[in-house]
Image: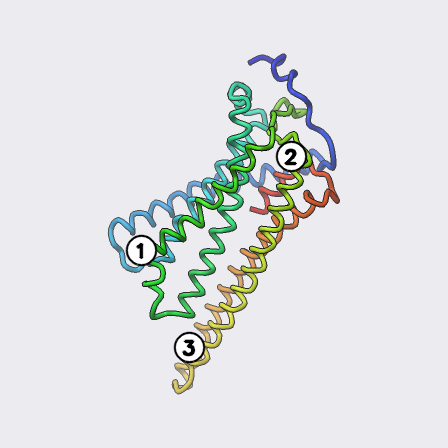
Amino acid sequence: MNICSLELLPPYSDGFTVDEKITEIVETIQFVFVCFTFPFYCMIVYFLFESQAKHIDELRSPFYKLCISTAVVDLWTLSTNYLGAMFPKWGWGVPIYIGLGSFYTHVYLYFAWSTGVCQAMSVSVLAANRLTALTFPDSYEKIWNGKRMQIAYGLQFILGLLIGLATFTNPAVLYRTEKLGVVPAFTNGELTTVFFIIGGLFLFANCIYLICSYCYLFYRLRLRNNQQNIGIRIMMNQRKREKARKSEYRLFIMSNIVVGVQISVCFLFFLEATQLVTLPSDTFYLFYNAAR
């Protein structure tokens, strides 16, 4: 590939843009963070897989199995974001991306949208798992074993992959960036807006579900802890209360992070769907990657 073939691509520089220095700082921080966390995340997934193979009872519950599948979705999403969007934007391996042409643009956009749905469904399935653990403790193992577990995996993966097929109905091309990189983007603006409207409504419904689920989960946890404290000696009661407070605090932090991320992504989709702010593809994914 030479410079001439890159210059044949249309430029992409419309709409609202972020200052170049700010963009570089944010992207550098993101990349450094990913470089440290990605191998660590892979190591955790490996040990969780090992625990399943070695039949370690403490780590073989349905919850940890769902944690593994959710981690796979997260790693898949990170790989898609950087291999499909960030690296070509920075000008890394541009000849390969241009050589792949429309195959690369469509496959990347398919995985980018599919993994977004998969991530949303994964956190929803995990929330449902925790709800059943507190609401039906005696039937928990039965509910999340066998075919029901396969349904949970299907919700995490298959639903997103099926919904993502809609992206193939929207033409996509490569655009040239000012730094001799490339950015894949849809060309049908009206259809893209429809995608964002549907995606925004889906994420909004998911946010409502997560908020309701974690509020009810928090309520059930407090109710259970209060019931356990009845009739216990004062010293033991204080220890129980302290342990309960720590458990409630961890749940509160986790739920706020999960819901906060989903609301942030939902807000980005709202901006794109309503076109209150016209974000170029690279700028949109700058915020989108930071949120996820």
Q: Nearer the viewer, mark 1 or mark 3?
A: 1
Q: Position of residue 219 (x, y in %)?
A: 51, 72
Give the class, few, some or many, for how many residues have Cα within 10 Å of label 2's Cα (few <14, many ≥20).
Answer: some
Quadrant housing residue 9: top right
Give the spatial CA distance, label 3 vs label 2.
Answer: 53 Å
Which amino acid, mark 3? Arg
Residue depicted at 75% across the width and 44% down the height:
276
Q: What residue did someone put label 1 on?
A: 146
Image point (73%, 31%), residue name: 14
Q: Residue at x 40, y 66 (%)?
A: 133
Q: Which of the two residues, 147 or 113, is positioned nearer the viewer here? A: 147
Residue flagged by tag 1: what amino acid is it? Gly
Tag 2, which secondary structure?
helix
Residue 116 point in image, percent of width and height = 53, 44
In the image, 144: left or right of 255? left
Q: How many marks?
A: 3
Is label 3 in contact with label 2 (beta carbons under 8 Å)?
Answer: no
Counting residues from the start of the chain, the first of labels 1 and 3 encountered is 1
Q: Sequence-wise, which precedes: disc 2 or disc 1?
A: 1
Quadrant containing the N terminus is top right
Q: Are marks 1 and 3 in contact (CB under 8 Å)?
A: no
Does 111 sit above or below residue 90?
A: below
- Give the CA distance from mark 1 to mark 3: 38 Å
Describe the element under mark 3 as helix, strand or loop. helix
Determine which of the numbered discs, if any, sits on residue 281 in the image: 2
Q: Amino acid at mark 2?
A: Ser
Q: Which residue is mark 3?
A: 239
Among the two numbered marks 3 and 2 on one chain, the one whose residue lies closer to the N terminus: 3
